Amino acid sequence: MSFFRTSLAITALTLAACSGPADRYSVAPPAVTETIRIGFRSIEVREISLPTYAAADEIALQDASGKLVTESGALWADSPERAVAMELSRALSKLTGARVASSPWPLEAFPDARLEVRFESLIARGDGQYHAAGQYFVGVSDGGRERSGLFELAVSFDPNGGPQAIALARGQLILDLAKYIARSGLS
C-alpha cells in the first residue's frame, strides 16, 4: 500500500512539474465616453450571482454543440464574481458620476440604492458572440420605487482570438450591462 501511495505521489509531482504555470487574463475596462443621469447619488453593487461555469477560474468557450470547452492553462486573473462586481461598479461610477462600490459598502452613510444582478448565462460562444442574460434588482431603503428587470445582451468577438479576445468582450459586455441598468433601473 505504501509503495502505491509513493508511486502516485511521484507521478503527481512529475505531472505538475511538466505543466507550466497557468496564464491569467484580466479584463481591461473599456473607455466610457458617455454620461447617463440617474436618480441616485450612491449605489451599492450588493451581489453578483454567476452560473457555476462562469464563476469558475477557467476561461470557457461554448462550442456549436453546446459543450463548454476550456483552454488548458487559461485562467481569469481574479475571481469572476468579484471581478464582474468590480467591473460593473467601475462602469456605473464612470457612466453616472454616482458613488458606486461593491459590497460590503465602505462608507459611513448608507447608499441610496442597492443593486443585485443574477446572471442566467454569461458565456463566450464559438459563433463569436459573448452572451449575457439574467435579471437585476434595485432595492431602495427610503421607501422609494424599487425596480427589477430582465436583460439579454451580446457583443461580438473573434473566436480565434483566444482568451484575450474573450476578456475584451467580457469588458465590453459588462459596460453595456451597466448602461442598460443605468437607463432602465436607476433613472
Image (cartoon, grey):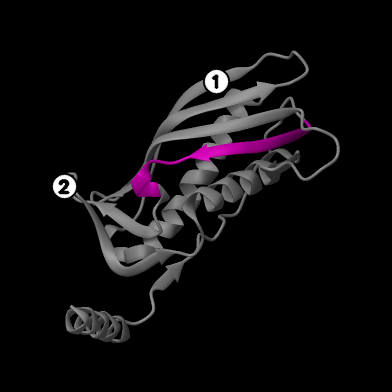
Q: Residue at x 69, y 46 (%)?
A: 94
Q: Looking at the picture, which amino acid does disc 1 mark?
A: Ser
Mark 1–mark 2 distance (CA, rounded to whole Å): 32 Å
Q: Which quadrant holds residue 137? A: top right
Task: Mark yes or no: residue 33 visible.
Answer: no
Q: Is residue 52 magenta?
A: yes
Q: For mark 2, does the 10 Å Cα neighbourhood hold few (<14), some (14 to 19), or many (20 or more) residues?
A: few
Of residue 179 and residue 121, the one placed in the foreground of this image is: 121
Q: Which residue is mark 1?
A: 148
Q: Residue at x 40, y 73 (%)?
A: 23
Circles 1 and 2 in contact, beta carbons < 8 Å:
no
Q: Position of residue 21 (x, y in %)?
A: 39, 79
- Name above or below for residue 167 compared with residue 92: below
In the picture, the disc for residue 120 is none
Q: Position of residue 46 (x, y in %)?
A: 63, 36
Task: Name, please, the residue furthest toward the front.
Answer: 1
Q: Position of residue 179 (x, y in %)?
A: 57, 36
Q: Quadrant of the C terminus?
A: top right
Q: Residue at x 40, y 65 (%)?
A: 75
Q: Position of residue 98 (x, y in %)?
A: 75, 38
Task: Mark yes or no: residue 87 visible.
Answer: yes
Q: Which residue is mark 2?
A: 64
- Name above or below for residue 10 compared with residue 113: below
Nearer-N-terminus badge (1/2): 2
Q: Quadrant of the N terminus?
A: bottom left
Q: Looking at the picture, which amino acid does disc 2 mark?
A: Ala
Mark 1: secondary structure: strand
The residue range painted magenta reads 41-54
Q: Choose mark 1 or mark 2, whichever is in front.
A: 1
- Name above or below for residue 166 compared with residue 110: below
Q: Image check: 148 left or right of 144?
A: left
